[in-house]
Image (cartoon, rainbow, N blue to C red):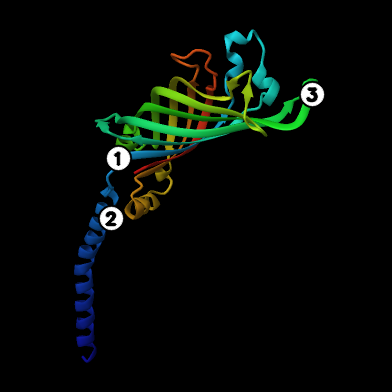
Amino acid sequence: MIARPRVVASLALAGALFATAPSASAEDATSTRYARIYQSPQYFALELRFSPYRPQIDDEPGLGGKTPYQDTFGSMRRLMVQVELDYQAFRIPYVGTVGPGLAVGYTNMSDKSFTQSGTRGEEETSLEIFPMYLVGVLRADTFYRHVGIPLVPYAKAGVGMGLWRATNPGGTSDAGGVKGEGKSFGLQGALGLSFALDAIDPSAALQLDNSVGINHTYLFAEYYLAALNGIGQSNALRVGTSSWAAGLAFEF
């Protein structure tokens, strides 16, 4: 008889816990649901780009088959590092974002210069190129946003410019009264594909967005053409190239 109040008390406590459990569970589910759908505003994309680069200097028809660039620097491609910032001005429903993009990069090649006897000397000669461009960018992220496929194809088209400078130990090269620096204009285009790293760990991606405002992080690869052949210019140095690029992209 003495144990009956304890049994009643235990049953009452269990009932209270059972009654409150669905409420707590529903609250947790609601919090999780709101956390998943929360996303900070998105206006920009930033790309850190890396590419093998070899300027098309020897493709100039006026050289008559001569290859001054290859003779000086060889045929090996050099690393080009570039930063691109895109403004995602508009969103096309069920397609993706579109807007302007601006990029600037740097690459350098150097080797021993030739002496009058045709052999390599001790002095270094180098060529620096600063490729840059202004393009329109379309990122078709509808597959990721609406279907859950973490792939974002994109396309770019616009104009480019390459600032270049040839130097030796004495400074900027000066051959035959022609200063070894200038700029070449041309067209720029690219097709690429990004993989959304958010898909690997969505919770970490959400925390990154909530803490610093980065909506999405991508690995990307693209094929691009920088036809910097001197549009509207005479005797422009062909410092453009056709190559591929890869790197990281952040939307914020």
Q: Amino acid at mark 3?
A: Thr
The disc, 2 or 3, on the residue closer to the chain's N-terminal end is: 2
Q: Is 73 situated left or right of 178 in this image? A: right
Q: Nearer the viewer, mark 2 or mark 3?
A: 3
Q: CA distance from mark 3 to mark 1?
A: 55 Å
Counting from the top left corner in percent of width and height, residue 56 is at 57, 19
Q: Which mark is on residue 119?
A: 3
- Residue at left offset 29%, top offset 42%: 42
Q: Taking 113 as reference, is 82 left or right?
A: left
Q: Residue furthest bottom?
A: 2
Q: Vertical placement of 239 versus 16: above or below? A: above
Q: Quadrant of the N terminus?
A: bottom left
- Tag shown at residue 32: 2
The quarter in which the C terminus is drawn is top left
Q: Which mark sits nearer the N-terminus, 3 or 1?
A: 1
- Residue shown at the point (39%, 22%) measured from the top left: 157
Using the image, tell me which numbered label, if any, was put on residue 216: none
Q: Nearer the viewer, residue 4 or 65?
A: 65
Q: Residue furthest front?
A: 177
Q: Is residue 226 left or right of residue 167?
A: left
